């Protein structure tokens, strides 16, 4: 009996030692109103989203913004010919907020229909690989077109200072049964990175790359 108990206890000990450690710092998230964003956290243009989060590495603030650009010397309303999308991540070090990374994209010199926006349902902060480090997901579209051709859509993810990107084009409904566009390409970081990152990126893509046009949305809308 004693030999059996010793054997059972040994098995339990070995089993517990062989299990991978899964305890990591949990992400905590909170949305920030424009009025309470700390003054050192700077951004250009109009505020789109502001979120504060904490992970094993510390405290961070992510801000996305957008603004139109105009032709030099033209009236602002008549001369708008571009749009810029900006994303900033600040990290708290020694009680001060410092810029950790920044991402931007734009369309310039557009004389036809201009479109640009962050896709709300594409923004997320995750810890998919459970390493205690937050992954910041951004998704946006940009277009300059005089027809119903696809717009450019990108998914950008930052894990710390490492950047991942999926680049493609929207899927546009041509008629009742036919669609145009919808192609995409994963960069090397996604191709070689954890499978869980690729899976999540493709889930975002599947849910947010269909684009439609109607009288209320002549520049297109992601559906």
Image (tube, helix red, strand yellow):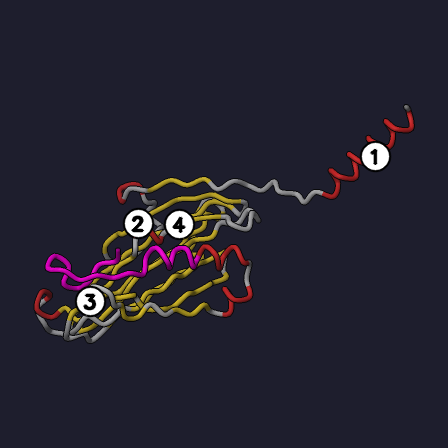
Q: Nearer the viewer, mark 4 or mark 2?
A: 4
Q: Is 173 contained in the magenta span?
A: no
Residue located 41% across and 41% down the image:
29
Secondary element at tag 4 = strand
Question: In this rendering, would 137 be left or right of 25?
Answer: left
Q: Residue furthest top?
A: 1
Side of 158 where 205 appears, left or right: left
Residue placed at 35% from the left, 50% from the top? 40
Nearer to us of marks 3 and 1 is: 3
| Foreground of the two, 207 or 175 | 175
Q: Which mark is residue 124?
A: 4
Q: Residue at x 43, y 65 (%)?
A: 165
Mark 2 crowdedness (10 Å alpha carbons): few <14, some 14-19, many ≥20 = some
Secondary structure beneath label 3: loop
**Relative vertical location of residue 25 with respect to residue 222 in this rendering, above or below:** above
Give me the C-alpha separation between circle 4 and circle 2.
Answer: 11 Å
């Amino acid at each position: 009996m004693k030999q059996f108990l010793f054997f059972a206890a040994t098995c339990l000990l070995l089993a517990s030692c062989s299990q991978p450690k899964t305890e990591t710092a949990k992400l905590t998230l909170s949305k920030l109103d424009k009025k309470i964003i700390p003054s050192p956290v700077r951004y250009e243009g109009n505020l789109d989203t502001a979120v504060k989060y904490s992970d094993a590495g510390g405290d961070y603030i992510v801000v996305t913004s957008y603004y139109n650009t105009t032709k030099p010397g033209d009236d602002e309303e008549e001369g708008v010919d571009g749009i810029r999308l900006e994303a900033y991540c600040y990290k708290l070090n020694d009680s001060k907020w410092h810029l950790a990374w920044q991402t931007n994209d734009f369309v310039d010199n557009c004389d036809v229909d201009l479109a640009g926006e962050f896709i709300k349902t594409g923004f997320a902060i995750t810890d998919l690989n459970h390493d205690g480090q937050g992954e910041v997901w951004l998704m946006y579209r940009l277009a300059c077109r005089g027809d119903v051709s696809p717009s450019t859509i990108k998914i950008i993810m930052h894990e710390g200072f490492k950047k991942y990107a999926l680049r493609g084009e929207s899927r546009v409904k041509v008629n009742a049964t036919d669609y145009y566009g919808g192609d995409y390409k994963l960069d090397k970081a996604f191709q070689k990175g954890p499978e869980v990152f690729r899976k999540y990126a493709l889930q975002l893509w599947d849910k947010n790359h269909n684009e439609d046009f109607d009288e209320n949305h002549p520049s297109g809308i992601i559906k």
